[in-house]
Structure formats: structure tokens, C-alpha cells
Amino acid sequence: MKKRLVLVAAVAAGLALAGCGTAKENTGDGAATVEVTHAMGTTKVPAAPKRVVVLDTDKVDTALTLGVKPVGAARAGELTGWPTYFGAGATDGITEVGVLDEPDLEGIAALKPDLILGSKFRQEKYYAELSKIAPTVFTENVGKTWKANFLLDGKALGKEQQAKDLLAAYEKRAKEVGAAVPNAATLKISLVRFMPDHIRVYGPESFSGIVLGDAGLGRPERQLLAAKDDKRFDKVSAERLTEVDGDSIFVAAYGEKSAAEQAKITAGPLWATLGAVKAGKTQVVADETWMTGIGVTAANKILDDLATHLK
């Protein structure tokens, strides 16, 4: 009887371990797999994937941050290449497989991936087809859940502990950078992004807004988006540029068309009336780190900019 109870307990413990997404199994060919619970269910993925396709910009950052070069990646629509902030050669050999909202399924299949990383927010309708190509793990959302996404994708990549360590190191550094800024909490740091057909201000639940919050930096009242359900960003017309003012303004542009519009508007008379502009407290920053990077390396690049420009 005692032996039977011990056996039952052992089986139950094994099932519980598998359910939490940490148990490893061997497939028929001897390759170890791990169960990962994600936005679309639970999927068995290789314990050490070798050919990874990623379908969002945050996952490019995550994979490269964790030392995994994707064999393929989808790109953001207005972008023409891969991130440059990882340095020369870091993205060489990555094959483009469509854009974020419309991945190229045939192109993905041709790469023979053993893992696909995407997001329910972007590619939910493609999940079944992607899963037929390779084990597929989806995060729920983008931007505001970037830290949870980083940890989930890290687990799927077989780099769970490394991801935890890097995220903790970033958060520690964010506090240190903020602590070095005089009157950090009372500053009004404005985030402005030029899009192809409008201007945005970014709130506390955006990627860059979260980084500012981690550093303990204050924001303009307008950019807290207190009355909005979506606190990632809000649109501002060119005629209401006074709404983007702050003690300091960090400005980015999404793609070449947006950069041309940024240059035109920031050279105009209304921009010149802003307090931050008059004080010389505006800074053009890289969109690929502040807006589309959405990962730990991009977040650290934002901290670099804050440390340089907020003195």
C-alpha cells in the first residue's frame, strides 16, 4: 500500500510539473522538449531551439538579447531593415518573412523553423497555420506587457533564467539612472512620435513610458492619459502642438515619411514656442530603440539616452 501511495504521489508531482511549463520530455528522436503555456494554449517546444522565426519587433530584440539569432523575422511596415543598435553583423542573415500583420507563411515554412514566436494581438488568425509549420508560442499583447513577454519568450527560447537575470539587471539600472537625475519625479518628460499621418504622445503604459516610470521620472499631465482606457498613446494634431510640451521632449519618427514630417513641423513657428524648445531641452532619439525595440536591450539604450540628456 505504501509503495502504491508513493507511486501515485510521484505521478501527480510529474503532472503538476508539466502543467507549469517547466517539465522536459524526450521526443522519439531523443530531442528534449519543454511545455510552454502561452496566449493560445500550451505547446511543446524544443528545449534548445536552433531555427527560430519571430513575428514582432520585440521578439527580434528578445532573441538577440538572449544570444539567439532568428533565421527569419517579420518587419514593421514602415521599416526597411533590422535594428542597428545591436552592432555590426548582429542581424546579418535574418530573412524577411512578411510584415507584422501579414506574415509570409510560405517564406516561414521554407526556413524550416523549429520554433515560431508571435503575438495574439498581431497574428491570432494565423496561429493554426503557423502551428502546422512549427511549434508556435504567442504572447497576449504588445508594448505594455513587454516584461512578461520577454520572460515568456525567454522560456520558449530555453533561456528562462538568463531572461530573468537580464530583466532584473535592467530594472536595477533604471533606478540608478533615475536617482542620478536631479528632481526626477517632478520633471515633466514628454514623449513625442511622428507617424506617417499623425503625431502621438506616449503614455505610462507604452514601452518607453514604462522605462521612464522605472527610472522614476515624472510626465506631463497630458501624457498620463488618465481619462483613457488605452494608456499607451494618444494622437495630437499639428495645430495643438502645445500639448506635447514638457520640461524635456524626446522626439522619434516612425520611418522615412514620418521623419520628413517631423523635420517640417519642428522647423515651424509653433514648435518654436514650446517651453522645452526655448530651453534647449529637446532631443531627437532613435525610433528603433524608443518605440519599436520593446525589449531589454532597447530599454537599456533608452536609459543611455536619459543618462546623457537629463543632467
Image (tube, rainbow, N blue to C red):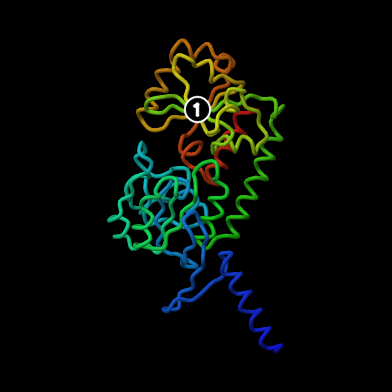
Q: Residue at x 55, y 33 (%)?
A: 229
Q: Quadrant of the N terminus?
A: bottom right
Q: Residue at x 39, y 27 (%)?
A: 259
In-front residue for pair 192/139: 139
Quarter residue 208 falls in: top right
Q: Residue at x 29, y 60 (%)?
A: 110
The residue beneath circle 1 is 234
Q: Quadrant of the C terminus?
A: top right
Where does the image place residue 241, in percent across and percent down from the top left? 49, 16
Q: Is residue 60 left or right of residue 226?
A: left
Where does the image place residue 81, in percent across and percent down from the top left? 36, 42
Q: Is residue 120 left or right of residue 6?
A: left
Q: Is residue 283 above or below residue 6?
A: above
Please name the amino acid that badge 1 sits on: Asp
In-front residue for pair 189/138: 138
Task: Determine crowd level at label 1: few under 14, some 14-19, many 20+ residues with C-alpha closer than 10 A.
Answer: some
Circle 1 — which element? strand
